[in-house]
Image (spheres, helix red, strand yellow):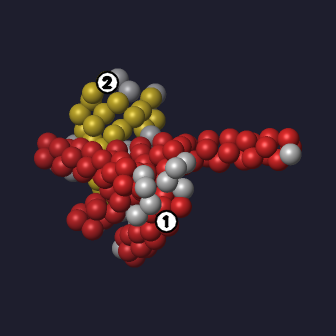
Amino acid sequence: MPKGVGRWLGLAGLVIGLDQITKLAVLGAFTLGESREVAPFFNLVLVYNRGAAFSFLADAGGWQKWFFLVLALGISAWIIGMLKRHAADALLCLALSLILGGALGNVIDRVIYGAVVDFLDFHAAGWHWPAFNVADSAITVGAVLLVWEQLFSVRAKNAKEAQS
């Protein structure tokens, strides 16, 4: 394993651990559909998402569980390969590690519960953002960092080429 990959895999493992611990806490304290207000704009709620982001394909009849499982595992394998090739690129590896940990955290849910456990419910003026979890948050932050890294690495590369 290339030097430095272990720390990125460790970060992904930390995301998985935090994700699973929070989900177990919610599963132990809530019944399905139960909601508790934490702040005027935020509730904790226990819901299951059988689909993907924003419940995409949630009512598709069951095949989507296996589709999302295989997709997440394939992407995870690709990410591990990217981590090996780019272990010294800190921002890229941070982004990929967050995405990897989040993806695998949700894979665990699909295997154990047949759906992803969501519990964070933000709302305003009667409108609720779709419930999500720690894994989803890690994926989102990782994706934003990945876009950031790609935008600025392209600019840096173009600036170097322009100077040559």
Q: Is residue 102 left or right of residue 16?
A: right
Give residue 39's position: percent from left, percent from top: 31, 24
Instruction: Give whichever of 45, 97 is nearer the camera.
Output: 97
Location of mark 1 (residue):
81
Q: Are there few (<14), some (14-19), or many (20+) residues within 10 Å of tag 2?
A: few
Out of 136 and 75, give the one closest to the viewer: 75
Classify residue 41 as left or right of residue 26.
Answer: right
Nearest to the observer: residue 81 or residue 66: 81
Residue at 35 percent of width and 23 percent of height: 40
Q: Residue furthest top?
A: 40
Q: Secondary structure at mark 1?
A: helix
Residue closest to the eye, 96 or 102:
96
Closer to the chain start, of discs 1 and 2, is: 2
Q: Quadrant of the C terminus?
A: top right
Mark 2: amino acid: Ala
- As drawn, 49 above or below 66: above
Q: Which residue is at a point 36% across and 38% down the rendered structure image?
A: 121
Q: Residue at x 31, y 65 (%)?
A: 110
The residue that mark 2 highlights is 39
**Residue 132: x, y in percent?**
38, 46
Secondary structure under the numbered disc 2 in the rendered image: strand
**The N terminus sits in image quarter:** bottom left
Is residue 77 at all visible to an observer of this figure?
yes
CA–CA distance between discs 1 and 2?
42 Å
Dividing the picture into quarters, in which one does residue 106 lie? Answer: bottom left
Q: Is residue 140 visible?
A: no
Residue that appears at 38% across and 27% down: 41
Going by the numbered disc 1, the residue's amino acid type is: Gly
